[in-house]
Image (spheres, rainbow, N blue to C red):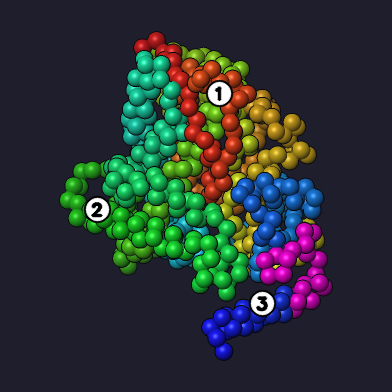
Amino acid sequence: MTAMAWTWTIAALVTLAFLLREWAWKRSSNKKKLPPGPRGFPIFGNLHMLGELPHRDLHRLAQKHGPIMYLRLGMVPGIVVSSPQAAEQFLKAHDLVFASRPPLEASKYISYEQKNLSMSPYGSYWRNIRKMCTLELLSNHKINSFKSMRNEELGLLIEFIREAARDCAAVDLSAKASSLSTDMSCRMVFGKKYMDKDLDERGFKAVIHEIMQLGAAPNLGDYIPCLAPLDLQGLTRRMKAVSKIIDDFFEKIIDEHVQSKDENKSKDFVDVMLSFMGSEESEYRIERSNIKAIILDMLGGSMDTSATVIEWALSELLKHPPVMKKVQKELKDVVGLERIVEESDLDSLEYLDMVLKETFRLHPIGPLLLPHEAMVDCTVNGFHIPQKSKVIINIWAIGRDPSVWSDAEKFFPERFVGSDIDVRGRDFQLIPFGSGRRRCPGMQLGLTVVRLVVAQLVHCFDWELPDNMLPNELDMTEEFGLVTPRAKHLLAIPTYRLCK
C-alpha cells in the first residue's frame, strides 16, 4: 500500500471513530435536556460559525437560541452564557462546579503547563498561588507602595504630551497608553524598565502582544485532539518559538535578582516570589517554572488590559465631546486647574467613574472572559451541562442585553446616576473582571491605574481629532484577542489647559 493510501486509510478510520463516538454520545445525552443551540457538522460541530470577532458571532447566535446556548466545538461540548441571570447561575449559584479551566495548547506552551494563576485547574495549587498573589503581590499595601512610581511614569507622559502640544502635533494615544502600562508593569514586576531590544528584535510589547493573540486564537487541536500533532494552523510552532524567547528573558531576570546584593532597594514582584522559592517552611513552595508562569500572568494581566481600557475610554470621550466637557468640569471643581490629579482625588470623581463603567460595558477588557470548565455533570436552569464542558461567558453580549440596558448601543454614562452597580463582580450585568472564585485578583490595581491615567490626561489637556475629523467619523473597529483593543491606533491633538 502506498503512503498516500495509508494516509487516506488512517483519515477514514479516524473519521469513523469520531462519528461513532459522536453517535454514542448523542444517544447518552438524548435522555438529558441540553441547552438549545444550532446544528453543526460532523466532527467540526459549530466551529465554522466563529469568525474573526467570535464574541459578536456568539451574540448573534444567542439572540436566536437563548442566553444559555449549547455549541459543539469539535469534540468539546461548549456552553455560551449571554445574560446577567445566566451568568449568575454559572458564576455564583454553581461557582464551584465551574471554577476550573480547560486544558489548552496555549496553556501548555505559554503558561508552563498551566502553572500560572489565570489558567491553572481548580485545586490546591491554584488556591495556594492565588493566596500568594492576593496577599503578597496584589494587596492594597503592595499597590500603595508603587504610588510614587505611578506618579513618576505618568509625569513623564504628561511632559511628552506638553511638548507635542507646543508643536500642535498629534499624539498616538494608543501607543502611549501601551508604553505607559508596559513601563509601570515592568517596574512593579521586575524592579526596572526594559527596552524593546532587551527581549527580541521585534520588541518587548510586540512579543507580549503576540502571546495575548496566540492565547485567544481558536486552535483546532484543542477541539479535535487527533489534529493537534499536525498543527494545521501553525499555532503550536509559533507558541513554541515565542515561549522560548520569553523563557530565556525570564531566566535572565531571575538570575539578575538572585545575584543582586542591593538590600536597600524596594522589593518587586520577582523578589517576593524568590523569597518563597524552595522554602520548606513556606506554604507556597514554588520553583522557577512557577515564578516564570506567574510573571507572565502579571505582565499579561497588567499591560494590555489597562492600556486597552484607557484607549477605549479616551475614544468614547473624543467621540462624545459633551461627555468630555462634563468630566473636565468635574475635575476642575474637585481638583482645580492649579495642580494635577492625585490618587487621593479619585474617590471624589463620581462622573468619571460613570464614564469608566460605561466604557467597561461597551468595551469589556476581554469580551469572552477566560473559559471555565465544568468539573462534574450539572443542571442549570433545567439544562444538563456535561462534565468537561467549556463554558464561555460572553460579557460583550451581556453589556448589550436590551432587557437590562436601554439604548444599549449608546454611550451614555448618565445611565449610572443613582445606581449602585459596580464592576467588582457582584452585579452580573457588569462583570469586566469576572466574578466568583476566578475573578481577576488584579482588579484593584487595574482600576487604580485606569482611573488615574484617564483623569490626568483629560484634566491636563483639551483634545481634538486630527485632520479636521468629526467626532462621529472616529473609527471604533475592534481587534479580537484575550483583550480587545482598537483595530486602528487613536490619534489626537492636545492643548495644555492647566494654569502651571
Q: Secondary structure at mark 3?
A: helix
Whether residue 127 appears in this view of the structure is: no
Q: CA distance from mark 1 to mark 2?
A: 43 Å
Residues drawn in magenta: 23-45
Q: CA distance from mark 2 to mark 3?
A: 52 Å
- Mark 2 or mark 3: which comes first in sequence? 3
Q: CA distance from mark 3 to mark 1?
A: 53 Å
Q: Residue drawn at (70%, 65%), measured in percent from left and top?
A: 45
| Closer mark to the observer between disc 2 and disc 3 | 3
| Closer mark to the observer between disc 1 and disc 2 | 1
Please name the residue that numbered disc 1 is placed on: 318
Task: Please tell me in which quadrant of the rendered image residue 355 appears.
Answer: top right
Give the number of the disc on residue 15: 3
Drawn side of residue 45 relative to residue 234, left or right: right
Q: Residues within 10 Å of mark 2 (few under 14, many from 20)?
A: some
**Residue 368 picture location, percent across and down:** 61, 50
Q: Residue drawn at (54%, 33%), measured in percent from left and top?
A: 312
